[in-house]
Amino acid sequence: MVRDTVVEAIGKAADIGEVARDDAGLRLCLGTGGSVRLFIGSPAQPKAHAEGSYTATLILEETAGLSTDQAREALAAVRRIPFTTTEMNVLRDQMPLTGELSAFLPPGCLSSVAPVLTVHHMTDFLVMVEAVLAMGVPAQAITVLDKGYPYRHTDRVDAHLTRQGIAVWPWTDAANALDDHAQRATGLGLRGLLVDDGGYTLPVLLEQRPDLLSHFVGLVEQTISGITRLEPWEGRIPLPIFSVAESRLKATVECYGIADAAVRNLLRLLPEEKLEGQPALVVGFGRIGEHIADVLRSRRMRVAVHDRQLVRLIAAHERGFLTNRCLSTLLSDHRPLLIVGCTGRTGLRGEHAAAITRNCYLVSTTSRNREFAVAELTDEARRVTDEGVLGTRLHLPSGAQATLVGDGFPINFHHAESLPNMYSDLILASLLVAASTLAAPDHGFAAGHNVAASDRVLESCGLLERYYARFGPEALR
């Protein structure tokens, strides 16, 4: 199956002529005069991989007649292999709350809606999509917006979704995607439902396509940054919002996991950097920021905190962190090696660049690249260099180099899977409980934010009981 899938992907990049098999593998002669050789085999170090793993290697032998784009697309075919049955079984075992949700909710509870899913394209998302299908939604009624982050398996996830007949659109074309979705949903006699992670959809409807709002029954939002994006329409939001983002459930379980994942991925990207004893600055002491500060302190860093809200700044001070109401003062006096943005909005601007006087890393935990004013900081730099996977380096007038890790995009998703699937299981299941709630005609949610009602549903639906049974004290006996 893997071999056939790779061959099919190569065929989309260039016409395949003769196919020959020999001891060295499968040789595909391309109609343009080029050729590639495909090898499918066991890993060189089997113990480093799960049982039943295979490696797919593609070598471009001849490039005659191939354009650079065709050659690149042909070689990329091995990254577009949908997940195998064995792999999906492993993922389902990791995510029982999500995978088995259709058995605990009313049959066909999503059959009246056509979901738009803007969720991170990691392996856990595939189990969530399977659950959506099991809850009564046909594949042709689903639209997925690809957020464009360089996840570890993003191409394979997209290929898997496409093979299921699900429409996948880039987030940069959200307006057209929502228009297309509304038309397909209407043709199926369904209304749309937005399930978002970062404010990618409802703001687009409000700003660009208000004519489509009547086609949607509501929004499920997973992140605080998505809630922040809706602030300009406060009091004027026409759809009900189920806020998993602001729920007690999410705050209790997910925040530490995100902080830990962010720091772990940073350590992977900076294997030679010594953090112990070095200064760090956390900008934003909210749900994620307070855990980031704790994790960095546990790594023996000297941690300072800035927050524009005085109550949060006092909370950080009372927890023993160095604080100051002036961000520039913390930058110049504390001289942090790490500057971690956790505000959910733009916290570090061009005006702060002059206060950066040592080499440092700017690290975001916020959706998209909102945390740092990248354009302003770039304008302040004498020059900018591309540092590959690590990100972008700003050479500042002070002589200091400030590296935008991951180009300012969230570190926990940068060429990584972020949270372990056992963490994300509860959150993705919560999103689907929220979706099934808004899909019911008698949901009782008013237009706008419904934080208290969201808490009541999530804390009474049985998910927490199942989660506690899995990880609580009884599970250890």
Image (spheres, helix red, strand yellow):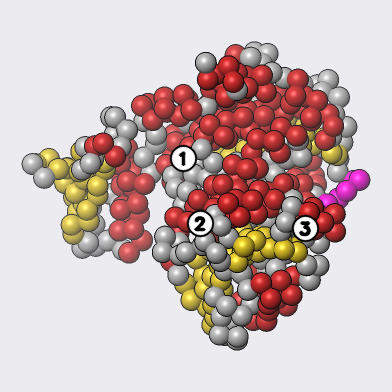
Task: Looking at the image, tell me whether mark 3 or mark 1 is earlier in sequence order.
Answer: 1
> In which quadrant of the rendered image does the N terminus lie?
top left
Task: Looking at the image, tell me whether mark 2 or mark 3 is earlier in sequence order.
Answer: 2
Q: Which residue does the image show at 72% across and 56% down from the upper left?
A: 320
Using the image, tell me which numbered label, if any, was put on residue 266. 2
Mark 3, residue position: 317
Task: Looking at the image, tell me whether mark 2 or mark 1 is earlier in sequence order.
Answer: 1
Quadrant of residue 34 in the image?
bottom left
Q: Which residue does the image show at 20% across and 43% down from the upper left?
A: 44
Residue 383 rendering spot, x and y as whole percentages: 54, 82
Going by the numbered disc 1, the residue's amino acid type is Val
Q: Nearer the viewer, mark 2 or mark 1?
A: 2
Going by the numbered disc 3, the residue's amino acid type is His
Going by the numbered disc 2, the residue's amino acid type is Leu
Q: Is residue 193 above or below residue 352?
A: above
Q: Which residues are magenta?
A: 231-236
Residue 146 rendering spot, x and y as whole percentages: 56, 46
Mark 1, residue position: 157
